[in-house]
Amino acid sequence: MTDPAVEARSAFAQVAPFDPDLASLTGEWFVDPAHSRVGFSVRHAMVTTVRGCFREYSSRLFFHGTKPTRSQAEIVINTGSVDTGVEQRDAHLIGRDFLDSANYPTMRFVSTSVETAGGDVFLMTGDLTIKDVTRPVTLELTYIGNVTDPFGYQRAGFDGTTTINRSDWGLTYDSRLAEGGAMVSEKVRLQFDIAAIRSAPAL
């Protein structure tokens, strides 16, 4: 049985007018770490939210402006670069209870498909690998816009997010509160605030 939501997105994609502004974006890009954030947030002790990010990563992006469904992305993250602003917590996160950075120094996302979801919103599905476990996830990406900076580099902005269950990737730490709830929530929201830049100045 066909998912009505998928049918609706496909129908919109067939009739939605092409945005000529996107055509100029076709080509190879990479994430500019100085102006981007690869982050996460998770509920802690049931009542607060802890936010953090990864400071070190590499990327490869290809955006097809006239046919966005042909776009591709890959990002490789150094798990040991996690930063929540608290050294003791960061040490716990890179230890064996969570990311185990000594044995699994990287995590990776590689896109497998892209579909339009209406307006400037795209759904990018791909394989997320953490601790040698690979599972599919879908990012909701919003295109923010593009500019040419004073140095001649063309830049484009995207915001992306998805929510995963950490235990699906072997992150099974399960300390419990006296009230019975989890110290760290199963659900983790991944956030990609992306400033992408071409690898060469725009001509």
Image (cartoon, rainbow, N blue to C red):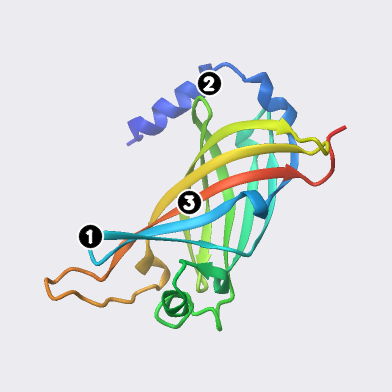
Q: Residue at x 57, y 33 (%)?
A: 144
Residue 61: give x, y in percent of width and height.
68, 47
Instruction: Decide if residue 6 is on the left or right side of residue 146.
Output: left
Q: Nearer the viewer, residue 112 or 28?
A: 28
**Residue 179 badge:** none
Identify the residue at horizontal 22%, vertical 62% (top origin). Answer: 46
Quarter containing the N terminus? top left
Q: Which mark is residue 14?
A: 2
- The residue that appears at 31% across and 64% down in the rendered structure is 186
The residue located at (13%, 72%) in the rendering is 180
Dot 2: few (<14), some (14–19), or many (≥20) neighbours within 10 Å?
Answer: few
Q: Amino acid at mark 3?
A: Gln
Quadrant in which residue 166 is drawn: bottom left
Mark toward the start of the polypeptide (2 vs 1):
2
Question: Closest to the observer: 28 or 113?
Answer: 28
Q: Amino acid at mark 2?
A: Gln
Q: CA distance from mark 2 to mark 1?
A: 44 Å
Cα separation, mark 1 vs mark 3, equals 20 Å
Which amino acid lies under the numbered mark 1 shown in the image of this protein?
A: Val
Query: Which quarter of the rendering shows the C terminus?
Result: top right
Figure check: 161 above or below 15: below
- 194 w.r.t. 187: above or below: above
Examine the image and state in which quarter residue 164 appears: bottom left
Across and down, in percent, residue 107 comes to 56, 67
Residue 191's tag is 3
Q: Which mark is residue 47?
A: 1
As helix, strand or loop, the secondary structure at mark 1 comes to: loop
Q: Secondary structure at mark 2?
A: helix
The span from disc 2 to disc 3 (Cα, nearest Å) is 29 Å
**Mark 3 surroundings within 10 Å by alpha-carbon count, few (fewer than 14), some (14 through 19), many (20 or more):** many
In the foreground, 77 or 91: 91
